[in-house]
Image (spheres, rainbow, N blue to C red):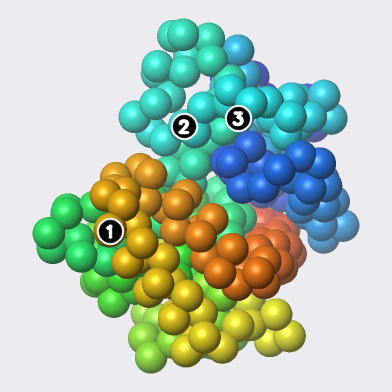
Amino acid sequence: MKISQEVKEALSNNDPVVALESTIISHGMPYPENLDMARKIERIVRDEGAVPATIAILEGVIHVGLNEDELMKLAQGSRVMKVSKRDIAYAISEKKDGATTVSATLLLAERAGINVFATGGIGGVHRFAENTFDISRDLEEIASCNVAVVSAGAKAILDLPKTLEYLETKGVEVIGYQTDSFPAFYTRESALSVTHRLDEPEAIARLMYAKWHLPLRGGIVIANPIPEEHSIPSEWIDEKINYALEEASSQGIKGKDTTPFLLSRVKELTEGSSLKANLELVYNNAVLAARIAKSYSQLVKQNP
């Protein structure tokens, strides 16, 4: 594992660090839009007083914190693997370039000593999982790693009630940031409830500190609703998602190909508005993650 000097110094001083995934760069959108997005997320984290640590695998080496050339390589690369937990050892042993998913980023962030991770939406239980057993590895890694995951809920293409039920079974708190309702990714609200509501980054930091110093093992989901001005009406987006699901079923798309297909198809059906919403919620999550990391850093320094 190669940790950048900036990240290494921040961790050694207990300064705030925010982990960032790299799949959104290499598999989320075309170049150069993906590079602009990656730069903006890192800039947002820095502007809020934290250090960004984008995580990826380059030529078989785990990198925690990327420089400009490394970000460029990910953004332009045409043969970058999508790396989940099960792919990490393969990517290393075969000296591959790999962009880390939520599950891989979580695992590697914890190994590096990073406690806060910002993403768009977590994976979860897929619709019709009672027939397919299709459940994202993200949920297991969230339950296993001492990392707070800031997201706009789970991806809207998933079965949200089953996803929350799974998290409850694993003992993972779902904290609504300034909301009692579990956000539905593109939409601010749903009919589902969060475990607890907390309205300040400092309160979330206290929860993190209390949980991990008991110690209780496992992560925390911080559900941060998409900003009101970028929220998409649930009825409209659900119609597009259901249409994409029918297409995936008719074309026999399943397993790891399901999520990329659905997100791409929903983007087409919404004429790009879903992608715009996705970007805005990621930026919003980066702001909150940096503020939580800063509060948690202060708490740790006050209580060494």
Give the amino acid at mark 2.
Val
The residue indicated by pointer 3 is 56
Label 2's element?
Answer: strand
> Measured from the top left, where is residue 98 in percent x and y?
55, 26
Give the amino acid at mark 1.
Ser
Evaluate whether residue 197 shows in this view.
no
Q: Quadrant of residue 12?
A: top right
Q: Quadrant of residue 245?
A: bottom left
Residues under labels 2 and 1: Cα distance? 25 Å
Q: Residues within 10 Å of mark 2 (few under 14, many from 20)?
A: many
Residue with the most extreme top position: 94
> Measured from the top left, where is residue 81 in percent x and y?
51, 27
Image point (56%, 88%), residue name: 233
Label 3's element?
Answer: strand
Mark drawn on residue 249: 1
Image point (62%, 19%), residue name: 58
Nearest the eye: 255 or 53: 255
> Measured from the top left, where is residue 287 in percent x and y?
74, 64
The residue indicated by pointer 2 is 83
> Measured from the top left, where is residue 80 in percent x and y?
58, 26
Image point (68%, 26%), residue name: 77
Number of the front mark, 1 or 3: 1
Label whose residue precedes the other's in the sequence (2 or 1)? 2
Number of the front mark, 2 or 3: 2
